[in-house]
Image (spheres, grey):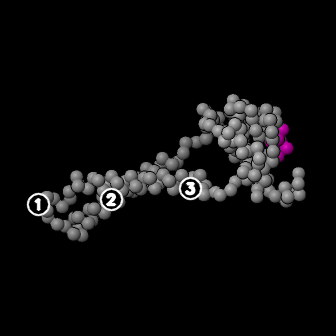
Amino acid sequence: MSKTQISQELHGILAEFANPGELYHAAQAVNKDGFRKFDTFSPFPIHGMDKAMSIRKSKLGWIVLGHGLLGLTGALSMMYFMMVVDYPINISGKTFMNVPAWIPVTFELTVLLSAFGAVFGMFFLNGLPQLNHPLFSSENFKRATDDGFFLCIEATDPRFEADNVRKMLKKLGASNVEDIYEE
């Protein structure tokens, strides 16, 4: 361990596994041991990994629904106020509240606000923008997009004890275990 690493704060412990099956079983074991602040990284999605890690469903759908309903009610309220209350014009004897003519604007505003909710909700839920992450300092982790399968247990987890975590990951079959420090 170098002097710079001693003065830096430990972010977590990163373990490399040989294949997706080993990573899946390691995630199950880590979850079963009660760890909650850990993540897995692989070059492709691994079927069942969400269940192995006990990841809850995303709140993004509710955020998009809320923004869509806001767009719907906002569009209808805006057009009602403009066409019926503020500046009513009788065109060809039609009613002031001509709902079929309002459908395109209502649809467009609903879709627009839903899209904004999806994009900005995803940014918020993922903690973005994050220009750098401590894992990027690991040379081995660069293989996560090619042929590497990694599991990282964060030091902020209540059950985290560095020596016990290292031993557990080695016991689970990790080929490489390394400490990751904050930068």
Tell me the distance, in whole angstroms, between the alpha carbons under discs 3 and 2: 25 Å
State the image quarter where residue 42 is shown. top right
Locate residue 101, reporting x and y percent: 23, 55
- Foreground of the two, 49 or 139: 139
Q: Which residue is mark 3?
A: 124
Asked whether the residues under the numbered discs 3 and 2 touch, taking CB atoms below 8 Å apart as contact, a structural biologist would say no
Q: Which residues are magenta?
A: 159-168
Q: Which residue is mark 1?
A: 92
Indicate which disc, 3 or 2, sits on the residue closer to the N terminus: 2
What residue type is disc 3 on? Phe
Locate residue 122, reporting x and y percent: 54, 52
Q: Is residue 137 left or right of residue 65?
A: right
Tell me, yes or no, whether the highlighted magenta stretch contains residue 162: yes
Residue 155 in view in this figure: no
What residue type is disc 2 on? Ala
Q: Is residue 19 above or below residue 94?
A: above
Q: Kindly report the secondary structure that dominates the magenta region of the rendered protein.
A: helix
Instruction: Check disc 1: other Cα within 10 Å, few if <14, some if 14-19, many if 20+.
Output: few
Tell me the distance, in whole angstroms, between the alpha carbons under discs 1 and 3: 49 Å
Q: Which residue is mark 2?
A: 75
Locate residue 126, reporting x and y percent: 59, 52
Under circle 1, the secondary element is loop
What residue type is disc 1 on? Ser
Locate residue 103, reporting x and y percent: 27, 52
Indicate which disc, 1 or 3, sits on the residue closer to the N terminus: 1
State the image quarter where residue 159 is shown. top right
Q: Quadrant of the C terminus?
A: bottom right
Q: Looking at the image, which residue sits at the far bottom?
A: 86
- Foreground of the two, 125 or 178: 178
Under circle 2, the secondary element is helix
Tell me, yes or no, whether the highlighted magenta stretch contains residue 22: no
